[in-house]
Image (tube, rainbow, N blue to C red):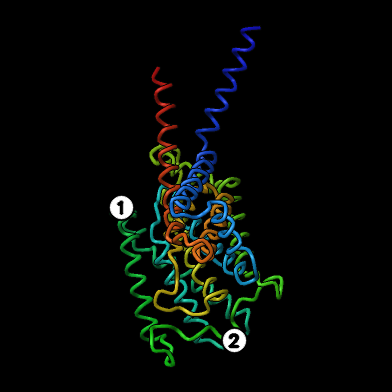
Amino acid sequence: MRWSLALKKATVNKMLRAGWSSSATLAVASVVLSLAALCLCSYFAGASPLKVMLSLFEGALQGRYALTTTLSEWVAMTLSGLAVLIPYRAGFFNVGGQGQLEVGAVAAAAVTLSLTAPRPLVILLALLAAVAAGVLAVSVPLVLRLRRGASEVTTTIMMNFACIQFMYAMVTGPLKDPKSWYGTTPPVPAAYQLPSFPPGSGVPAGMWVAALIALAAWWLMNSTVFGLYLRAVGGNRTAAVAAGIPVDRVLTGSVLMGAALAGLAGGLELLGYTFRVAEGWSKSWGMVGIPIALLGGNPLGVLAVGLLFAILETGSRSMQALTGVPAALIYLFQGLPVIIYLGLRASAWYSRWTQAAR
């Protein structure tokens, strides 16, 4: 009897340790602790934490305009998260999603403002141009990584600056709206704007595109040979080379795929929500994609975390208006879960290492 109880206790402890060390559990714990920290900060700011949480979700989901804005934010954040996650699985840390998104939007704007053709054709060409621009933006860091071993973190960060300045040059130069006193493109013609789906619902069509892409990415990464190669290259490059896996080809494919999704995010935001590219037109979707990718852990997780971040981003304005709590606290929340996640993961690794050393 004692032996049976001891065995059951050991099994339960083992299951708990395994669950605590899993990425999904750590991500959920990080988000919960960060929400607790947000509530604590709200309390010290003199507001009711419950009222702060309610105002956040009401401001993001109550009313057609709020819901449309939240879903549009979700599109950009989901695709930006996938733009980081897919290359990261192969060992490439793409920090250039913001720049790839910016040039993608510029390319899509150039197509819609210069072509006159049937609506489906122009929209398709605009989105393909956005994808191509994102791929072009990552080509230099990719070549430097493959040929010279340069750190992609440094090169993709520097490409962000180059891409953003290119966007400024376009909206104040060749693509500038002559009727505007500041740098902006003319609005996308109504005929080439993405409709809501279902019609009249206010739900952006880009949301369905992003959801389908996330599902396809999940299938690709978990049910195909390419996904197996991706995990092998990211997990142990030396072993992957020894196993005969085309490491450079897998790395190149994952990086180009991620940059294409970042460019597509820019095109979808332009055609489905903002309808013009201007100075400071976008939020830091590309950079927010980094914590979304780390906390999500897989494409379906990116969908969930992206929705949470979109709700917080949109609802923060209502939160500040109704409770007086600064909306800047939301930016604290965007970074805090990653710090907590890395701390918890390091703790789990250390626990496993000490147990193995005994």
Q: Earlier in the sequence, mark 1 or mark 2?
A: 2
Residue 23 in the image: state x and y as whole percent: 51, 40
Mark 2 closeness class: few <14, some 14–19, many ≥20 residues within 10 Å: few
Q: Quadrant of residue 94?
A: bottom left
Can see residue 87?
Answer: no
Residue 283 in the image: state x and y as whole percent: 44, 67
Quarter of the image containing the C terminus? top left
Q: Which residue is labeled 2 in the image?
A: 117
**In the image: residue 279, left or right of residue 304:** left
Can see residue 219?
Answer: yes
Q: Amino acid at mark 1?
A: Ser
Q: Secondary structure at mark 2?
A: loop
**In the image: residue 53, left or right of residue 175:** right
Q: Amino acid at mark 2?
A: Ala
Mark 1 closeness class: few <14, some 14–19, many ≥20 residues within 10 Å: some
Q: Secondary structure at mark 1?
A: loop
Residue occupying image coordinates x 33% and y 60%: 157
